[in-house]
Amino acid sequence: MKETIRVVFASLFLLFCFSTSAIAANETPTTAVKGELPPGLIIPEVARPGPAFNVDKATEAYVNLLNDEQRAKSDAYFENGYYLDVADTLIVVLIAAFLLFSGISRRMREMAKRVSHRPWLYTTIYVAMYFVLIFLLTLPWNIYMGFFREHAYGLATQNFGAWFGETLLGLGLSVLFGAPVLAIIYAAVRRVGKSWWAWTGAISFVFIIFFAMIAPVFISPMFNEYKPLPAGELRESLLSMARASEIPADNIYVFDASKQTTRISANVSGMMGTTRISLNDNLLNRTSPEEIRAVMGHEMGHYVLNHSLRLVVYITLVLTFGFLFVHFAFDGLLKHYGKRWDVSDRGDPAGLPLAMALLTIFMTVMTPLNNSITRQAEAEADAFGLAVAGEPHGFATAAMRLSTYRKIRPGELEEIMFYDHPSGYARVYRSMTWLKENQQDSRVVKAMQNNQ
Ligand SMILES: [Zn+2]
């Protein structure tokens, strides 16, 4: 046991060195750049509708709202993310190798078996220990990624205590829910033999739907307070949009994200009876009504186009191929190393670090596919939002605000590989294209009169 503890601490130290050197290698030192755009709707002169309106020039005018310093900062934040994602995968693989070759994984299984010899129970105990150990081993990395890096770019608002409290809550939830789910998957794996990957895909689908359903009701409120949108002109205009799209009006909420982040955002969450649209208080308090209507039009697009269910189906399919990959790679590696690791077969929980590492490698390789599946749905919601809200300047301004931390104009291949949303440039371009074709839209005419 003493030796185990020593090995754990040694690896903690190694990981800490690794993550701090990654900081030094990847981060450009950030002076306190005030990254934000000024509040209120922004309409560059060139982007005003008229007979000479030109989509490219109007788009350029919006993009140029970011000065060189802001653009360098958002490019750096986003591009470093590419390397950090790869480092993330590397860490999972290194930890798996460490747990298997050091015999820690085998010893964890023996400890769990001392409590009970029932497979479902010792598997649950093993998985719980695995989650806690992974949490400890990746803590320095996660502190850097989730806390220091976010603060360095002015995106986080929490102090360390509050951040760490929420991180612990996240660990508690993954042990509470993740351990039984994995125990169920292991029970299936032990029963069904070679077709386990297909069964695991089906089980994953059921659990993803289940957690999507309970998330807005039980999980999100643990991190943020959700309230109905306060009465007033804005609420009325959003409710009118909701009614026009046949979205139940009592499903619009505001949540206090400003306690964690400076980002503006909104989302659709839940499934079937629990589906709702939530906007965060940064969006509500720091942007114009036109931007809010544009963003909420986008979210309503997700709702009406039933993206939640569609994305769950697509992602489950990718995951199932991931399980198939694990099936072949796991059995192959076990032939060579099974004795050395003391992992008997794929139903042995001591092999979990290997299965997790293989699945992580697969999902990293599939990043462009997963991003493209999501980005396509996002582009559809963009088109829906423009049509239903009729706020091209609101959407372009919001896209520019998001571009203070997302690289605004990636290369074509870069966008396919790394973007799960259309880039800021693509969104402004779409807004200006819509505007060109809808200059006589009564909402556009009215907005221009108000903004003379
Ligand atoms: Zn979206």
Image (cartoon, helix red, strand yellow):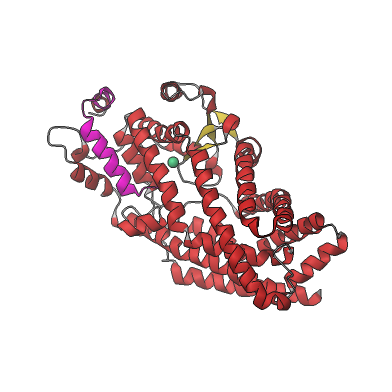
Vertical side of 302 occupied by 147: above or below = below
**Quarter-wise, where is residue 339 in the image?**
bottom right
Left or right of 449? Residue 374 is: right
* Residue 62 percent location from the top left of the image: 26, 45
* Residue 360 percent location from the top left of the image: 56, 62
- Residue at point 62%, 47% (across, down): 202
Q: Is residue 297 visible?
A: yes
Left or right of 334? Residue 49 is: left
Camera-side residue of 34 and 350: 350
Q: Where's ligand 1: which quadrant?
A: top left
- Residue at point 48%, 35% (across, down): 306
Left or right of 243? Residue 190 is: right
Q: Is residue 9 visible?
A: no
* Residue 291 percent location from the top left of the image: 37, 35
Name the main secondary structure of what is drawn in magenta.
Answer: helix
Camera-side residue of 63 and 302: 302
Left or right of 435? Residue 93 is: right
Vertical side of 337 occupied by 429: above or below = above
**Quarter-wise, where is residue 357 in the image?**
bottom right
Quadrant for the C terminus, please.
Answer: top left
Q: Which residues are magenta?
A: 420-447
* Residue 149 percent location from the top left of the image: 50, 59
**Quarter-wise, where is residue 234 in the image?**
top left
Camera-side residue of 191 and 159: 191
Q: How many marks?
A: 0
Camera-side residue of 305 and 418: 305
Quadrant for the N terminus, please.
Answer: bottom right
Vertical side of 305 occupied by 35: above or below = below
- Residue at point 55%, 36% (across, down): 255
Q: Is residue 424 within the magenta segment?
A: yes
Q: Is residue 92 within the magenta segment?
A: no
